[in-house]
Image (cartoon, grey):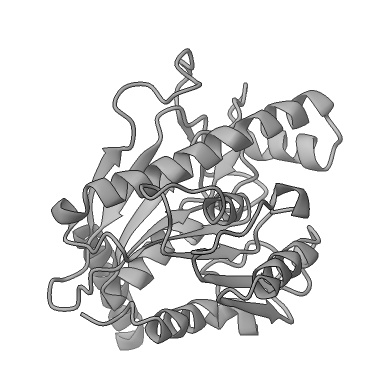
C-alpha cells in the first residue's frame, strides 16, 4: 500500500514539474500561415484510436508550446521538437511533450511544434492515415503529400521565430537545434538543407525519419551536425533512409552520428519497451554534451 502511495506522489510531482515547465504557447506567424490563408476548419483531438495515444489533427495555426528550464540548470541551448503522425496527425505526448519534459531537466529550452497537416473530414485521423498509407487511397495520399511542404515551411519558420526571440527566452541564438520523429523527422532533416541565416538549425536530430533520398539537396559547407536514430525492425522500412542521410553527411565530411537499434519498431519515442531504443534520449544527451551544448 505504501509503495502505491509513493508511486502516486511521484506521478503527481512529475505532473507539477511538467506544468511548471510548460510556460506558454506562441503563434509562429503574424496572422494566417502563408499558403493556407483560407483554411477555416477547427483543430481536433482524438484519444481513442488504433495508435493507442492521443493525437491532434486539422492544425491550421502553427504554434510552439514553450518549456523553460529552471534558471539554475539553464544552458542557453534550445530545440524545436516536431512530433510525427504522417502529416495527418500529431503524436503530441510520446513524441512531443514527454520529450520536452525530459530535455528541459537538462537545461534545454524546448519548443514543441504544432505544424500544418492534411485536412481530415472526420474525427478519426488514424483511419485517414491508414487509408492513405496502407489502403492505397490516392486522393488522401495527394492531400497528405500536399501538406508536406507546408509542414517543412512551418519548421523553418519555427527556428526563425525562436532565433528572433532568443533574448526573450534567455537562449543563445547560435545554440538552436531541431529534432523530429517520423514525419516530424522529415521536417527536421529538411531544415538541414537550403537554410538561411535566420532559419539555420545549429544541430539536427531526425529520429526514425521519413526522408527519401529524393528530398536531399546539396550539403552546405556550414552544414549542422546530425544525430540520427532508427530501429532495425522499423515496419515502415525507414532504416535505409536514415542510412542514406548518414552516408550523404559522412561523404561530405560533415559531423554525423547514426544509431540503429536492434529493436524498437516505429514510433518508439519515449516509450519504455525494454529494448535498447529505450535509451536513445540518454545517448542523444551525451551527444549534445560532446558539442558543449549542455554547459551553463
110 sits left or right of 232 in the view: left
**Quadrant housing the N terminus:** bottom left
What residue is at 55 percent from the left and 78 percent from the top?
280
Q: Is residue 259 above or below residue 238?
A: below
Residue in the foreground of this view, choosing between 7 and 88: 88
Q: Residue furthest right?
A: 136
Q: Position of residue 198 (x, y in %)?
A: 36, 47
Q: Is residue 47 above or below residue 110?
A: above
State the image quarter where residue 13 is shown. bottom left
Instruction: For residue 46, say whether it is visible.
Output: no
**Quadrant housing the C terminus:** bottom left
Residue in the foreground of this view, choosing between 235 and 45: 235
What residue is at 46 percent from the left and 45 percent from the top?
155
Instruction: For residue 170, say whether it is visible.
Output: yes
164 sits left or right of 247 in the view: left
What residue is at 34 percent from the left and 54 percent from the top?
111
Q: Is residue 160 above or below residue 22?
A: above
Residue in the foreground of this view, choosing between 268 and 186: 186
Q: Is residue 39 above or below residue 198?
A: above
Q: Residue furthest front?
A: 221
Q: Position of residue 101 (x, y in %)?
A: 34, 66
Number of numbered discs = 0
Q: Position of residue 211 (x, y in %)?
A: 69, 54
Q: Position of residue 49 (x, y in %)?
A: 63, 44
State the image quarter where residue 288 is shown. bottom left
216 sits left or right of 282 in the view: right
Amino acid at each position: 500500500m505504501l509503495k502505491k502511495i509513493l508511486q502516486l506522489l511521484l506521478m503527481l510531482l512529475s505532473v507539477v514539474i511538467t506544468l511548471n515547465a510548460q510556460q506558454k504557447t506562441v503563434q509562429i506567424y503574424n496572422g494566417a500561415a502563408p499558403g493556407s490563408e483560407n483554411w477555416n476548419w477547427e483543430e481536433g483531438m482524438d484519444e481513442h484510436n488504433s495508435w493507442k495515444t492521443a493525437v491532434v489533427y486539422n492544425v491550421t495555426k502553427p504554434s510552439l508550446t514553450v518549456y523553460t528550464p529552471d534558471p539554475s540548470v539553464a544552458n542557453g541551448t534550445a530545440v524545436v521538437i516536431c512530433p510525427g503522425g504522417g502529416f495527418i496527425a500529431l503524436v503530441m505526448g510520446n513524441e512531443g511533450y514527454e520529450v520536452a519534459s525530459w530535455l528541459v531537466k537538462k537545461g534545454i529550452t524546448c519548443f514543441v511544434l504544432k505544424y500544418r497537416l492534411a485536412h481530415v473530414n472526420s474525427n478519426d485521423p488514424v483511419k485517414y492515415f491508414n487509408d492513405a498509407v496502407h489502403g492505397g487511397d490516392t486522393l488522401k495520399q495527394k492531400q497528405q503529400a500536399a501538406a508536406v511542404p507546408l509542414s517543412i515551411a512551418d519548421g523553418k519558420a519555427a527556428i526563425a521565430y525562436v532565433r528572433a526571440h532568443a533574448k526573450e527566452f534567455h537562449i543563445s541564438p547560435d545554440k538552436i537545434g531541431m529534432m523530429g520523429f517520423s514525419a516530424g523527422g522529415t521536417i527536421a532533416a529538411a531544415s538541414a538543407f537550403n537554410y538561411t541565416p535566420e532559419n539555420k538549425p545549429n544541430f539536427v536530430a531526425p529520429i526514425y525519419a521519413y526522408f527519401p533520398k529524393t528530398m536531399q539537396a546539396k550539403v552546405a559547407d556550414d552544414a549542422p551536425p546530425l544525430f540520427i536514430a532508427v530501429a532495425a525492425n522499423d515496419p515502415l522500412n525507414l532504416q535505409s533512409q536514415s542510412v542514406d542521410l548518414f552516408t550523404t553527411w559522412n561523404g561530405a565530411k560533415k559531423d554525423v552520428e547514426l544509431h540503429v537499434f536492434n529493436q524498437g519498431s516505429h514510433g518508439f519515442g519515449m516509450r519504455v519497451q525494454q529494448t535498447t531504443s529505450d535509451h536513445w534520449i540518454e545517448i542523444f544527451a551525451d551527444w549534445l554534451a560532446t558539442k558543449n551544448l549542455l554547459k551553463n
